[in-house]
Amino acid sequence: MKYAVTLLAAAVLTACGGPKQEVKPEQTVTVTQQQQQLNYPVTAKGDVVDTYFGTQVADPYRWLEDDRSSETEAWVKAQNQTTFDYLKQIPFRDQIRDKLQQAWNYERVGAPFKEGDYTYFYKNDGLQNQFVLYRQKDGGEVEVFLDPNTFSADGTTSLADIRFSRDGKLAAYAISEGGSDWRKVIVIDTETKQQIGDTLTDIKFSGIAWVGNDGFFYSSYDKPDGSELSAMTDQHKLYYHKLGTPQSADKVIFGATDEQKHRYVGASVTEDDRYLLVSAAVSTSGNKLFIKDLTQPDSSFVTILDDTSSDTDLVDNVGDTLILVTNRNAPNRKVVKVSAKAPQPENWQDLIPETEHVLRISSGAGFLFANYIVDAIAKVKQYDYDGKLVRDIELPGVGSVGGFGGKKDADTLYFSFANYITPGSIYAFEPKAGASSLYNQPKVNFDPSRYVSEQVFYTSKDGTRVPMIISYRKDLKRDGSNPTILYGYGGFNISLTPSFSVANAVWMELGGIYAVANIRGGGEYGKEWHRAGTQLQKQNVFDDFIAAAEYLQTEKYTSPAKTAVRGGSNGGLLVGAVMTQRPELFGVAIPQVGVLDMLRYHTFTAGAGWAYDYGTSEQSEDMFKYLLGYSPVHNVKAGVTYPATMITTADHDDRVVPAHSFKFAAELQDKASKATPQLIRIDVKAGHGAGMPVSMVIDQAADIYSFTLFNMGYSSLPQ
């Protein structure tokens, strides 16, 4: 059955402009004073009903899952018209966009890296849609190597990855069109920049692992039947592409058989081209691991791990000694070494034992760098390959660091440092002497001395102690009147460590508070912290976030009317869940590219791989009932006043398909009280977020901040 969208001939908003009276920033304007009457596009309802363990669940907006239908296309256009007509009436929207553009317009330079005879680095002059890759040879002239801004006229085609052959004479780079996870890979001669061979297509969730100059490994799925943006993909395969041959001749190295069927398959090749390691996983947590000796053409794969109960990856090798990082029997991770001739866990030897803090590891210049997360803050230690501590590395301050990676023969390594009020700077590090020096500090129009970023600990519903970092202007008064964005994620073992954002800097400059809660489901305190927010314990994540909002309000940082909750992807689920569970606690909700239909998420693209965190509605009756109990799409109640909500998604999001957001918007517009706006903003020719052009990022940020402040009661910008 097909459905039509009724397009309204009348104006979307009955009034044309914001409130007439001037409102002081400290005043709260009631919803009825501020909001204009919204006429939402009519969303047709179907009669689809699914039965789970004897329980019938209606799915009236199932038709919106068809991303290729003309009806869905018309619905998207109508919703965007409604949303943008609303946004353009906010009196300070253009001011915010101007502030963001001015703040963004500064040079950003990435850490240099050596490939062959050249030193490469990324740079953005300021408002370029994509970073440009430059190179320099022996102190000579700097030249453009790849400029992704030329890949498409509108900047929506991005450089997703690039990997060089061992001698740097060849490069294979992946591009993403319109934000899609499906990639194309192009091989070029680095000296002439001329393409070699045909463009490889239909590659997804893949690295590029060279073997000498002969070819490389990559991963992909069979092209799905139906929509490539939403159809399910579940058997990942590892291929080898030999240069000079067509892609149709590429051999499947792993994943072709039922026994080797996995949802995620990835490859890495040791720096000496001696070993291929293949990781195979059925979900986003846990992997099997296999090794193949590339010096023996007919060698078979040897199993290192044959179960997915832990996460284990290659760090480096020294001859036939492998160095691995693992959380097997070590929830906070440790580094082990083992002979490639007998690489099974019973032969592992601890190189850097597990500690009470979560470990992230990198290698470069013949050393190991242990980056520990201590209450979401970085501490770094340098070790040699025998596991001996060389030194504690002095960092520029309290925040996050990344880097310390490089080739074995590197003389200098680089690391980045940032926190919520310190723009990211790059430091050069001499690994033998242990000396650090500032390599590049961006000239941002932002004065960190005017701001404070403090870490607090609060208590969640079940008594768990949870950290949160709150950043704001020093002249802020804790009187409950401050506009606040509370951000969270809470899933997939991902840690939210301090980082600098131009958009967040503008928010704080306007007098806003930016708070990040390090809730359960993340990786800040290791695997146990992650597990405590999965499946039948997922409510812990929501309770932690709700408790963060209550803390901010009790401590007079803000009030419910001035609290906005924001999160993306799994964080979009977080926002959708807490706004439907505790709508009175928040004034504004911004769920972005969220997983919002918890009964069907696993039926789209690679969604089934998220089952470790979520469980599925087919898993058991208990799991079905639990998911139904918090699934945002299924928990919108008629007549309830929900926070002013602007859902954001994109038409090319093939990670979390936009149907999640479409359905949630339709439910809110149909059932929520008319006291607050329930809008959806849908980017066109964009995906889950990676590679989004700067112009589009600025437009989205301006709209989010405008919507947020307007619905907190402001008719002019806070001072």
Image (spheres, grey):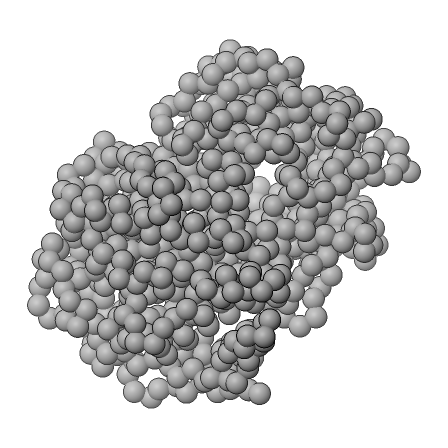
Q: Is residue 15 placed above or below 152 in the rendered structure?
A: below
Position of the N terminus by quadrant? bottom right
Q: Using the rendered image of the protein, determine whether residue 66 is visible from the camera's viewpoint.
A: no
Identity of the residue drawn at 73% across and 57% down: 235
Q: Is residue 240 placed above or below 619 in the rendered structure?
A: above
Q: Along the line of sight, which residue is nearer the eye, 451 or 586?
A: 586
Instruction: Measuring from the top left, give residue 333's x and y in whole percent.
Output: 58, 31
Q: How many marks?
A: 0
Q: Along the line of sight, which residue is nearer the eye, 443 or 495?
A: 495
Taking the image as shown, residue 336 lies to the left or right of residue 553, namely right
Identity of the residue drawn at 70% across and 38% down: 268
Q: Along the line of sight, which residue is nearer the eye, 226 or 455?
A: 455
Image-quadrant location for residue 432: top right
Q: Using the rendered image of the protein, determine whether residue 552 is visible from the camera's viewpoint.
A: yes
Taking the image as shown, residue 602 lies to the left or right of residue 213, namely left
Taking the image as shown, residue 408 lies to the left or right of residue 401, namely right
Q: Is residue 608 placed above or below 215 in the rendered structure?
A: below
Image-quadrant location for residue 704: bottom left
Instruction: Measuring from the top left, give residue 113's x and y in whole percent.
Output: 57, 30
Q: Residue furthest right?
A: 298
Identity of the residue drawn at 54% across and 12% down: 390
Image-quadrant location for residue 212: top right
Instruction: Measuring from the top left, give residue 497's x and y in whole percent.
Output: 42, 37
Instruction: Measuring from the top left, give residue 128's x and y in whole percent.
Output: 43, 49
Identity of the residue drawn at 69% across and 59% down: 234
